[in-house]
Image (tube, rainbow, N blue to C red):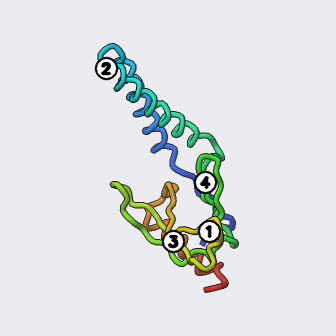
Amino acid sequence: MQNIPLILKPGKVKSSILLVISIGFVALGISLLDRNMLIAILNIMFFGICFIVFLLNLIPGSSYLKIDEKGIEMKNLFRMTFIPWQAVSSFETKWVAFNKLVIFNLNKNLAGEKLKRRQGGFPDTYGMSADKLAELLNEYKAKFDLSA
């Protein structure tokens, strides 16, 4: 088990590749302006927003997963969510649109007002495989969840 708190950061390579792809599609949209203005504008707007999101994700401190004895603090695009160990019943993996992600099942009785859903997921695997991240989170939960 690693040091407490453990802070995992999303991979910069994935965001950088998506950033470059977004730039390419914005350029494609610009080249289409004289042929099909509506499609070109929609293309520029959509991939321009994607570009901004991927650029924000590259800013240090904008996204991370912090694991400590109290629970998990997930920060994504500067928005923070805290999930106490008692609110989670388990961590597992699930395929979502060609990506294997880590999901968590919430203990409905202990989840609290902000976490009313029965399931949640992480937007990234933070440089690990989904299986390894789920295993790591389950180890920390077993160690620190006093309600189990």
The quarter of the picture where the N terminus appears is bottom right
Q: Earlier in the sequence, mark 1 or mark 4?
A: 1
Q: Quadrant of residue 141?
A: bottom right
Please tell me whether mark 1 sits on a helix, a strand or a loop: loop
Please tell me whether mark 4 sits on a helix, a strand or a loop: strand
Mark 2 vs mark 4, foreground winner is 2
Q: Earlier in the sequence, mark 3 or mark 2?
A: 2
At label 3, counting other C-alpha atoms closer than 10 Å, the crowd grade (few under 14, some 14-19, many 20 or more) is few
Mark 3 vs mark 4, foreground winner is 3
Residue marked by disc 4: 64
Residue marked by disc 2: 36
Mark 1 vs mark 3, foreground winner is 3
Residue marked by disc 1: 2
Image position, residue 139 (x, y; %) = 55, 76
**Nearer to us in this view, 9 or 2:** 9
> Along the horizontal axis of the image, is 69 left or right of 56?
right
Mark 1 vs mark 2, foreground winner is 2
Q: Amino acid at mark 3?
A: Arg
Q: In whole angstroms, how far apart are the C-alphas of marks 1 and 4? A: 16 Å
Q: Amino acid at mark 4?
A: Tyr
Mark 3–mark 4 CB contact (< 8 Å): no
**Nearer to us in this view, 143 or 1:** 143
At label 1, counting other C-alpha atoms closer than 10 Å, the crowd grade (few under 14, some 14-19, many 20 or more) is few
Q: Farthest residue toward the top?
A: 34
Q: In whole angstroms, how far apart are the C-alphas of marks 3 and 4? A: 23 Å
